[in-house]
Amino acid sequence: MAEVRFELATKLYSGNDEPAVDALDLEIRDGELMVLVGPSGSGKSTALRMLAGLEEVDAGTIWIGDRDVTDEQPKDRDVAMVFQNYGLYPYLDVAGNLGFPLRMARVKGAERDRRVREIAELLDLTPFLSRKPAQLSGGQRQRVAMGRAIIREPSAFLMDEPLSNLDAKLRVQMRAEIATLQSRLGTTTIFVTHDQVEAMTMGHRVAVLRDGRLQQCDTPRRLYDQPINVFVAGFIGSPAMNLCTLPVVGGRAELGGRELALPPGINGAGSVVVGLRPEALELADDGLPGRVEVVEELGADAYAFCAAQLPGGEMRLIARTDARHTPRIGDRVGLRPRFDEVHLFDADSGVRLAT
């Protein structure tokens, strides 16, 4: 096990003006499960491939423990990678796939067989050791891919969207299994996903990337409660945070008939971005006038998507509501903000404002 560090690590592809990964500074602690999350093109998979040695580093350095691995070959980095497509050998059975890394490392047959049985038992694969990958379900193939990485006992596991080929129910099951397994093994793990729900439920910490730049790295709870900018606020959370741009006149701004408590530094005219989580909007008789357009019922929770009247015009706001008493489509409602849960951002830079 070892910590992993990116120090101003940069990757620029030929023909592109902007780096795919731009001066990434990130430390993954020994034994930590770090999730890299962001939209397509944010640089998360490129950063993982740089760490694995599958992409060259154009500037900066990458460390695994006390070793600078920036220019080392992939085989010398002591990391194991789990890919989106599993990467299993179709002509080998499960036992052969699990033992393949040990065979390449010239581990003796008896020791190899012992470790294959050990990993198979850990991952509930013992009944399938003689089966080929084509005879396995998606979840079983994913376990084999995990086992092949685990059996090497590497310094770090690298996982590139390993659950994206699974159906929704199996994804939920597998992410819980991976998190539990990582906790038992205590191996430093970097997990890449575009699914922010996956990121929030698995990561000890989550690093949010956009356009190759690290936006914020923190625990899931702090990312949710204290997003550093408008992008993180809108990306983290499902449904997304409501973001409204309001005019500031004479250093004052109003929402739903009440004055917002703005930071002392805001004076004169301009605008401010106000963020409200769906749970911070209540359906009531007063507040912002709105019309229910869609209701999503999710069992214990329900969300009302409303067209609301704001100073800048009409926009859609999402409010969480009691699933036992949901409004109907077309109902006129009031949307009452909980002002102690308001997030404020600078309208020009998108940066969070102190409140």
Image (tube, rainbow, N blue to C red):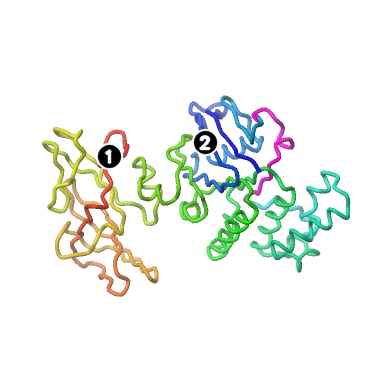
Does the segment drawn in magenta span residue 249? no
Q: Magenta residues, as a range?
A: 68-84
- Is 323 placed above or below 231 here? below
Q: Toward which corner of the image does residue 262 lie, by quadrant?
A: top left
Q: Residue at x 58, y 45 (%)?
A: 190
- Name the foreground residue: 191 vs 89: 191
Helix, strand, or loop for circle 2? strand
Instruction: Give the residue at the far bottom of this rendering.
Output: 324
Q: Residue at x 72, y 32 (%)?
A: 73
| Marks 1 and 2 close (CB-CB < 8 Å) | no
Q: Residue at x 66, y 35 (%)?
A: 53
| Label 1 to label 2: alpha-carbon separation | 25 Å
- Name the foreground residue: 120 vs 95: 120
Residue highlighted by disc 1: 354
Q: Amino acid at mark 1?
A: Ala
Residue highlighted by disc 2: 26
- Name the foreground residue: 355 vs 270: 355
Q: Position of residue 240 (x, y in %)?
A: 36, 53
> Can you tell which mark lies on residue 112?
none
Q: Quadrant of the C terminus?
A: top left
